[in-house]
Structures are given as structure tokens and as C-alpha cells.
Image: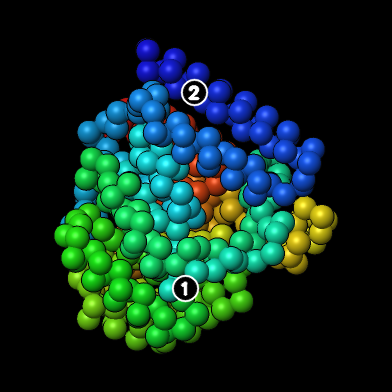
Amino acid sequence: MLNKCRLIFLQALYLINRKFIISFLKIFSPDLEKSIVVGDLILFWIMKTPFKYFFKFHIPKNISTKVFNLNFPSPVIAASFKDHSSSLHFWQLIGVGAVTYKTLLKEPSKGNLRPRVVEVRIDGKKHLINSLGLPNKGIDHFINTKVIENIIYQNRPIGISIGGNSDEEYLQSLKTIEQFIENKNYRNIFYEINVSCPNTVHGKTLNDNCERLINLLSSFQLITSRPIFVKVAPDTSNDFFLKLGNFLNMQNNLGINIGNTKSQSVENLNLSSSIFRHESGGLSGPVLYNSTLESVKFLSSRFNFPIIATGGASDYDSVKNLLENGASLVGMAAQLVFNPFEIAKINRDLSNEV
């Protein structure tokens, strides 16, 4: 009862503070990203104090799942969209079974011009659309700042997402990170190969060329034996799924992540250039759920490799349905922004069903 009251209090506090920060900063600028920066800064200081343990929620032991050689205490994991270590650790405390570090590129990148993130409502539900363009600090920063050491928590798996503008960049990035992981003897690591980012110029090339992707995955397996998940777009065709699935099904360390944000024209969302600078972006939120579910059903009925269902899951019912239809894990992104404390509720309800 005490945990339930604490959960309700923290959820209300989070929602009130989020709304206040966004509304206050909107007075000075329509750029939602400024609210994200302020929120990250607040969380950074909170996570340096003992108060952080007030956010900690126990994960019931009966909902754990094993995928490849990794043990996930909860099947609900944080999808790859954040590189702020305080946020990643915050979600671990609340109860995600794993976190995935934001897609890394070989070299630092500022991403697209701002404003490039906006919150929209579709069918009365909150969604996000972004055209970030994969801003990141690069692999050298990731290695030299010892990010993984800051998010190692109770032996939970950690995912590292890798992107690239060419096959050679993908391979070189994986080699560099794998060597670092090996030298540090880090365990419980899996990789995500992002071939489907819809808000970059070259992000979908591998998602449009299955033969090239398969050749690249074969090269990856010569570099590492760790689990690798291929992150594909939510609108990937069944023909592509079949070609890729036949290959993945013959491997012992490859799986698939469905999916990514969905490319969406801002014209259809009636967004002005003052709040969103670009003509299109990647949409995330509940509207992606049905597509994700159908893709999970299609693949799980034909193949046996692990599936991460990322796209549209926001509550217990959607998570349960994806798991029952063949997903091994369920990735969350938008919900972690809007209401991360939903994770603790989902874990509790999953436990009651087992």
C-alpha cells in the first residue's frame, strides 16, 4: 500500500513539474528541446543525492525473462533515444529491465537545426515528433567519459545502439566499441544496429537494401559474439521481413527490433515552422502500436529469433498483448518522456498475471 501511494505521488509530481517547465519556458521560446535540457539538468542533480532512492521500485521476480544469454528482470526496456546517464539510471530505478544508449556515430554530430522536437496530440493522445538528426558526442566521448560505469546497475543488460553513414563506418564503430567493452570486461552488453532512423538523410539506406544489410550483419558476427538486434522501421515491408528473417533465423546471436519512429510529414500535423523547422520527422507514440503488433505477429508466426517490440506501447494492456503475440521484450520511448512511472505499474500488473 505504501509503495502504491508513493507511486501515485511521484507520478503526479512528475507530471505537474513537467507541465510547469514546458509552460514556463514556452513564454520565452517555442523550442521544446529547452525544456528537455532543463529537465535533464534537474534530474542530474537529483541523481547525485540520496533522494534518488525515493524513485526506486522493486521489480517482481516472476516477470524476468532470458533473451540469448542475458537476464532481463523486466521485459519492459528503455528504447534507444537518450544519452543522458542520469535519465538512464533514473529509469533503471523505476524498473526498466534494461536501458539502451542512444545511437552512436563515429564522429560527433550536432544533428539538424532547431526547433526539431515537438509534442502533438493524435486521437487525443500525446505523441512526439522529432527531426533531431542523431545529434551525439561520438564514440570517443562515449569511451573516454566512462558512460557505462555510470549506468551499471544490479547487473541489468545495457544496449549500445550504433549508426553509420556507410558500411565501413558501421564496422569501424562496432570494432572500436567491442574492443573497449572487451578491455573493460563488461558483461551484459548487447548491440543494436540502427538502420532505420527516418529523420536523417542516409538513415534508411540499409532498411531499403536487405542483401547489403545481411552482408553487413555477417561481418558484424566476425567482430563480436554478443547479441545483436537489428532496428528496422515500423513500415518495413513483409518481403523485407521475410528475407531478413530467413537469415536471422539461422544465426544464434541475432534478433530484430521493431521498430523506430515513423516518418511523418508535418503538413499532416498542421505544425508551423516556428515550432518545428523541418518538413518531416520521426513520429513516436501510441499511433504506432497497431503496426508494431502486426509486425510482431507476422514475424513470430514464421521465425524463432527474439523480437523487441518498440513502437506505441504505453500501458499494461499494450505490453501484455505484444508479449503474448511473440515479442521477447517491449521497448518504450515516448512513454518514458510523458510518464516514466507507468513502468512500475506495468511491472506490478505483469506480476499479478503470471
Q: Is residue 157 visible?
A: yes
Foreground tag (1 vs 2) = 1
Q: Is residue 323 above or below residue 10?
A: below
Percent coordinates x, y for residue 231 in the rendering: 43, 66
Side of 62 relative to 121 (left or right): left
Provide the secondary structure element on which disc 1 rests: loop
Percent coordinates x, y for residue 20 in the rendering: 68, 29
Q: Quadrant of the C terminus?
A: top left
The residue beneath circle 2 is: 10
Quarter of the image holding residue 3?
top left
Mark 2 is surrounded, within 10 Å at the Cα level, by few (under 14), some (14 to 19) or many (20 or more) other residues, namely some
The foreground one among 314 and 21 is 21
Percent coordinates x, y for residue 29 in the rendering: 77, 45
- Look at 29% across and 32% down and name the residue there: 59
Mark 1 or mark 2, which has the lower sequence index? 2
Q: Is residue 16 above or below residue 72?
A: above
Q: Amino acid at mark 2?
A: Leu
Q: Is residue 75 above or below residue 4?
A: below
Q: Amino acid at mark 1?
A: Glu
The foreground one among 170 and 4 is 170
- Look at 35% across and 25% down and name the residue there: 50
Mark 1 is surrounded, within 10 Å at the Cα level, by few (under 14), some (14 to 19) or many (20 or more) other residues, namely some
| Numbered tag placed on residue 107 in the rendering | 1
Q: Is residue 346 visible?
A: no
Side of 19 relative to 187 (left or right): right
